[in-house]
Image: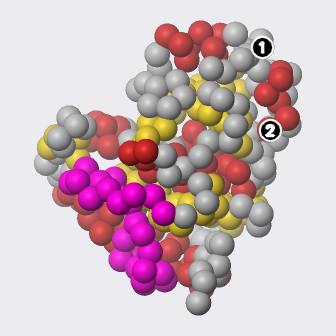
Amino acid sequence: MAQPATPRADARAVLEAAMRTAGQTIEALKAAGLAPRDKADASPVTEADEAAEQILEAAVRGVEPDAVIVGEETASAGHLPPPPGRFWLIDPLDGTRDFIAGRDGYTVNLALVVAGVPVFGLVLHPPSGRLWGGAVGEGAWQADREGGQRAIRTRTLPAAPALVLSHSHLDAKTRAWAEAVEGATRASAGSSIKFCLLAEGTADAYPRFGPTMEWDTAAADAVLRAAGGITIGADGAPLRYGKPGYRNEAFLAIGDPGATGKLPAFA
């Protein structure tokens, strides 16, 4: 039987519960003390990253036994399957450097990609318990730690756009682009939270010129798209997933898709 384009309600409940379990595990391991080490690419990893990925992979297998899953930690270990038409992306702890440093800018991320498009995503901020979700064509939402949920939507670009920038990857090209946005306010944030701020209508654009991996962006990009926004590449087309090596180049995430002509050229 063919899988639905996005998970059914019962599957979503399983996946959301797994996200919260992963977040609780991360917080418990942080409280117990961390022993970070470097991966082959010199990026840091902890036992929290690995434990969270195992929880999420098991949950995906529970709802879709034949799923192709690309997780950051298994990919780092050399398990990187060619991208099929339908696959899942897991970033079990986006913002590991913030996590290790004791800052709160880290998230747990799970996404489903179909035909190059992130169609479903969940993003959890473990310190606050906030969970963002989105299914393209169905809408986006935010839930709190107690289970209260509300629909979220992007906003029309205001006269004074609010930009969110990476505090750990703020290069000269990004700074110059942001400074060229007339009347804009600028704030920095870590991890995939930046996309979620656009999705809930509290920010308007997130430029990124440096490279990222698809598991860094897919879940929050799905939330943004479900909320009415879009992420475009340097070619001006919506960012595609399943690229060689699962690698992103420059992109611009925007809450108001009709605002590209009101913003500086992005290339």
Please name the amino acid that badge 1 sits on: Gly
Q: CA distance from mark 2 to mark 1?
A: 19 Å
Residue drawn at (74%, 39%), measured in percent from left and top?
Answer: 255
Q: Is residue 33 above or below residue 155?
A: below
**211 is within the stretch colored magenta:** no
Q: Quadrant of residue 24?
A: bottom left
Q: Nearer the viewer, residue 185 or 228?
A: 228
Q: Nearer the viewer, residue 215 or 129?
A: 215
Q: Is residue 47 above or below residue 64?
A: above
For the C terminus, which image quadrant? top right
Please state the horizontal and vertical placement of residue 196, each as a whole percent of the image: 62, 46
Please name the amino acid that badge 2 sits on: Pro
Q: Is residue 27 above or below residue 17?
A: above
Instruction: Tell me the magenta residue range.
Output: 57-84
Residue drawn at (35%, 38%), measured in percent from left and top?
Answer: 98
Label 1 CA crowd tier, 10 Å (few <14, some 14–19, many 20+): few
Tally the numbered discs: 2
Which numbered marker is on residue 29? none
Please state the horizontal and vertical placement of residue 103, each as a whole percent of the image: 37, 38
**78 is within the stretch colored magenta:** yes
Q: Badge 2 is on which residue?
A: 257
Q: Quadrant of residue 90?
A: bottom left
Label 2 CA crowd tier, 10 Å (few <14, some 14–19, many 20+): some
Tell whether 63 sits left or right of 147: left
